[in-house]
Image (cartoon, helix red, strand yellow):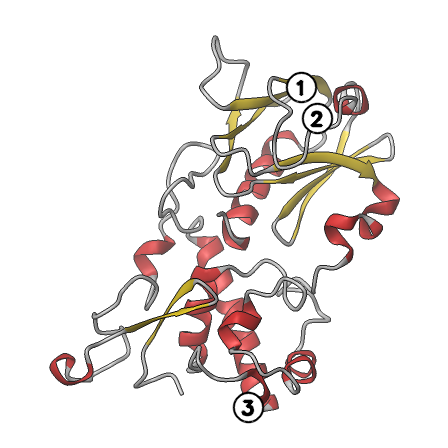
């Protein structure tokens, strides 16, 4: 599933291409996604100006000049393709084609776990999709003190807490593992054992890792491609994720004795860590 850096990369490509454009047509070829695409979405969007395009955690929001906003979630395998003009033919799993005065945006989703809908712009925060989400990691309200207060009575593993979208929204499995490594905190630590200083260090590490991943265009492991068809390359900078048995970049330990990077399954998700550097 595309995580925050991948969604940010896709959002920015869409914004740079069609921000300020007129929506000339919307063609929906398959409405059966995670939620059915509303039957009147085409009428809502056509002949509007695109005012703003931004990311809300793992969602892409497109504000229109008629008081409505389109909401897009990529699910497990959703892709966005950006073209200068309509293609002669569509590819398999091209479900929605949005033609604008500045270019064409195509939503492709093989597994159809994504989502495309709309709501009134001034009601976005009350929309059920957003109402229970935690702070974006880059939100000013996301502070070390906020994490400390949130974690102080939690008896779950910190790795699982980072995947809880009600606490911080947008962090997935890859970047939770990498951020905990950067912060020197074991994924097996119980939340309530973290100090205020450690919570502040963890938030700094989360932001550092996410910024690096955004600069690298995200991580391509399976389905993810950038809108121009190229791959992200942050996977080449992973320190621990999917590197079981290898030495982490900052370690001088004897692999024969330590066994290198460890893998543990928490909540059904694989976590990777260095038990020498992460405590």
Residue that label 1 marks: 101
- Report x, y in % for residue 126: 84, 51
Q: Nearer the viewer, residue 221 or 201?
A: 221
| Dot placed on the residue nearer the N-terminal end, 3 or 2 | 2
Q: Which mark is residue 252?
A: none
Secondary structure, mark 2, is: loop
| Dot placed on the residue nearer the N-terminal end, 3 or 1 | 1
Q: Residues within 10 Å of mark 2 (few under 14, many from 20)?
A: some
Residue that label 3 marks: 193
Alpha-carbon span between mark 3 and mark 1: 54 Å
Above or below residue 70? Residue 189 is below
Residue that label 2 marks: 21
| Residue for point 68% across, 30% down | 36
Q: Are marks 1 and 2 in contact (CB under 8 Å)?
A: yes
Numbered disc total: 3
Secondary structure, mark 1, is: loop
Residue most toward the front? 268
Q: Quick check: 268 left or right of 204? A: left
Q: Quick check: 120 left or right of 130? A: right
Depth-wise, is mark 3 or mark 1 nearer the camera? 3
| Residue for point 75% across, 27% down | 38
Quadrant of the frame with the C terminus: bottom left
Alpha-carbon span between mark 3 and mark 2: 51 Å
Q: Residues within 10 Å of mark 1 (few under 14, many from 20)?
A: some
Above or below residue 144? Residue 23 is above
- Report x, y in % for residue 268: 44, 62
Location of residue 257 by image quarter = bottom left
């Amino acid at each position: 599933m595309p995580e925050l850096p991948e969604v940010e990369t896709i959002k920015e490509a869409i914004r740079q291409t069609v921000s300020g454009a007129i929506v000339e047509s919307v063609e929906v070829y398959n409405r059966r996604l995670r939620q059915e695409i509303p039957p009147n979405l085409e009428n809502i969007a056509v002949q509007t100006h695109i005012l703003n395009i931004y990311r809300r955690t793992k969602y892409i929001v497109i504000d229109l000049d008629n008081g409505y906003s389109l909401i897009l979630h990529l699910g497990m395998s959703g892709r966005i393709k950006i073209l200068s003009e309509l293609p002669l033919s569509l590819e398999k799993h091209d479900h929605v084609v949005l033609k604008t005065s500045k270019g064409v945006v195509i939503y492709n989703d093989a597994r159809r776990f994504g989502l495309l809908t709309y709501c009134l712009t001034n009601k976005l925060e009350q929309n059920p999709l957003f109402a229970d989400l935690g702070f974006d990691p880059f939100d000013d309200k996301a502070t070390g003190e906020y994490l400390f207060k949130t974690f102080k009575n939690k008896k779950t593993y910190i790795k699982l807490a980072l995947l809880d979208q009600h606490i911080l929204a947008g962090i997935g499995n890859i970047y939770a593992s990498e951020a905990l490594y950067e912060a020197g905190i074991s994924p097996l630590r119980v939340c309530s054992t973290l100090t205020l200083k450690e919570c502040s260090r963890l938030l700094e590490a989360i932001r550092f890792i996410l910024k690096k991943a955004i600069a690298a265009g995200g991580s391509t492991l399976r389905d993810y491609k950038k809108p121009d068809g190229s791959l992200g390359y942050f996977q080449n900078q992973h320190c621990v994720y999917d590197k079981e048995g290898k030495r982490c970049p900052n370690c001088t330990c004897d692999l024969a004795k330590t066994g290198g990077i460890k893998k543990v399954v928490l909540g059904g998700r694989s976590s990777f860590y260095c038990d020498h550097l992460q405590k």
